[in-house]
Image (spheres, grey):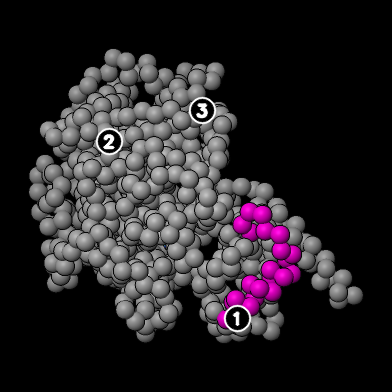
Amino acid sequence: MADVFKIGLGNDYPEIRENSVSDFISFWEEQAKKLSWFSPWNKTLEWSPPFARWFEGGLINASYNALDVHQNNKAEKPAIIWEGESGESKILTYKDLWVEVQKFANVLKSLGIKKGDRVTIYLPMVPELPISMLACSRIGVTHTVVFSGFSSASLRGRIEDSKSKIVITSDGGYRRGKIVKLKEVVDEAIQNLEFIEHVIVLERTKEPIELSSKDLIWSDLMKDSSETCEPEKLESTHPLYILYTSGTTGKPKGVLHGTGGYLTHLNSTFGWAFDIKDSDVFFCTADIGWVTGHSYVVYGPLLHGATEIMYEGAPDYPDPSRMWSIIQKYKATIFYTTPTALRMFMKFGDDIPNSFDLSTIRLLGTVGEPINPEVWKWYFRTIGKEKCPIIDTWWQTETGGMLISALPGIETIPLKPGSGTRPIPGVTISVVDENGDEVSPNTKGYLIIKKPWPGMLLTLWGDDEKYKNAYWSKFQNSYYSGDYAKIDEDGYFWLLGRADDVLKVAGHRIGTAELESCIVSHDDVAEAAVCGIPDEVKGEVIIAFAVLVEDVEKNSSLLEKEIFEKIRNDIGAIATPKQIYFVSKLPKTRSGKIMRRLLKTIANNETIGDVSTLDDGTAVTEIQSMFQELQKSIKGKNN
Ligand code: ATP
Ligand code: MG
């Protein structure tokens, strides 16, 4: 039986949910009217499966909705409070941002860039990153942001795929006190790419750089650029951006998002989920290189005229108190982060957050992976001081915005740690078996979306066939999310990990999330990952990896015994791993997600494929050598 927390912000608008039930198309039409359109649409939804065209014929502009609409009453309000890694800060008001965006849009225009072109943005977390994105959207250029931690090979692949004419980068970026030479990475990435016309270089670190004939300096270009640039009136389905997925399950996919539908989805979910008020200081820790940064650092908050914090560096630099010190310094009221970050903070104990004033916080959120109930409770207790609701928001790069979440802005719903609660209004989500039939309560199945929703991807860039195959071929007329879930007796959704990661032991299907949460609920364990390896008798046996909290002194066989005991009690003997490896790190994607497919590959002695999105190679090496040890010892025993 899950714990239930009755906590809410006290806003109840049940009519929003009711209205969404009878007719989802009219419902979203009403939501879309909250944005500013240059001209209304002819048709709310043109659905020729699996391609959706929302608000067809309507003309809109993203940067206009993010900036121009606030100039009457919020021009002097801070839009972005930026903190650099070394502690300096800068405030950009809505007016400042508006001016910078127009100037930079004029720069792009002066370089011959026009509607329909693509521009790749490879920048650290500096204000010029959202400025570049908004400038692109102002003139109908499709931006494609590449996380600035990626290697030149990954960057090159993405530039080649999108055929960008311009790359925007900086001389360097700060990461944990060191300078990463981004310009050099770009130089390597674009070698012999003739279609690249220019590289625009922002001087962030002022490191000496080599300039070629294609290179232009940001500040030179901006100096005399005009401060007014009319926004292009764009078709609602005009492509706003291409963004590659994290690559947790395989090679990243180039997700293409439109404008009107996407903005409608964000405008609605940002308000519903974060219950945003004019006085709020919103802090989302995501890098803009990921979809969370696109949707809930750039577009969502700005559409609402919110004030937000943008932080340049690593969350634990120079020490694990950084997030709490930022919250205290700027009096943040809403904090949105990932389970991975929370597990890391938790590992360092309560004393660190307890020594900061976090009393301004009134709402907490997570995204990116299933949150272990144990971690949820820590977040609730230690960060939220038992007074803040936690929203666990499920969504994907492909969905554009949240699809499952508690929505404190419109309802007070009791929370259960580890459950995202219910789908947002206006969407139809089910959990089904292999045949597409809905499963009974508390039964695991595939999470599918049965009707189009406004934030959904237009397609995969340049590959409609792959779009059809990846998402629309497994179940008829439904979007296949690739995630495994169950719905409990109260209609709450529980995300149980990736369908590809599911463990099949002696005919039972065990969700990775469930088992990992159980292991993490042991006091000494900070993080866990499980995977299956083939076994002649059982089909598959489970191998677990665990990272311990700081300063654990227990020996590993005692720990293993205690953890096994916990698994037997909480889930059942069937889920007991064959072995637990205690490691110092788990292999993760750059966005912080555990890469189970990699563990599986290593465990199965297969060659490691595409690891371009892997964060830290040492974790792989460590796990690989543990396996070799194991294999040796098994051989030894058999002899
Ligand atoms: P790829 O599709 O390339 O393998 P990815 O799925 O990790 O990469 P994203 O779009 O960044 O790329 O992540 C979406 C996925 O993250 C979801 O499908 C789900 O597995 C996981 N996820 C996101 N939010 C939650 C959440 N609140 N609870 C559980 N899982 C979540
Ligand atoms: Mg995915």
Q: Is residue 505 visible?
A: no
* Cα distance in 3D space between marks 3 and 2: 25 Å
Q: Residue at x 63, y 54 (%)?
A: 550
Position of residue 267 measured from the top left corner of the image (x, y, whole percent): 22, 50
Secondary structure under badge 3?
loop
Q: Earlier in the sequence, mark 1 or mark 2?
A: 2
The label on residue 79 is 2
Q: Earlier in the sequence, mark 1 or mark 3?
A: 3
Q: Residue at x 48, y 33 (%)?
A: 85
Secondary structure under badge 1?
helix
Crowd tier of the residue under label 2, counting other residues whose Cα lies within 10 Å: few below 14, some 14–19, many 20 or above: many
The label on residue 243 is none
Position of residue 433 measured from the top left corner of the image (x, y, whole percent): 41, 80
3 vs 2, front mark: 2
Secondary structure under badge 2?
strand
Position of residue 73 measured from the top left corner of the image (x, y, whole percent): 13, 35
The amino acid beneath tag 2 is: Ala
Residue for badge 1: 568
Q: Read off the magenta span.
A: 548-569
Q: Badges 1 and 2: C-beta atoms under 8 Å apart?
A: no
1 vs 3, front mark: 1
Q: Badges 3 and 2: C-beta atoms under 8 Å apart?
A: no
Q: Badges 1 and 3: C-beta atoms under 8 Å apart?
A: no
The amino acid beneath tag 1 is: Arg
The amino acid beneath tag 3 is: Gly
Q: Residue at x 52, y 47 (%)?
A: 352
Position of residue 255 measured from the top left corner of the image (x, y, whole percent): 38, 51
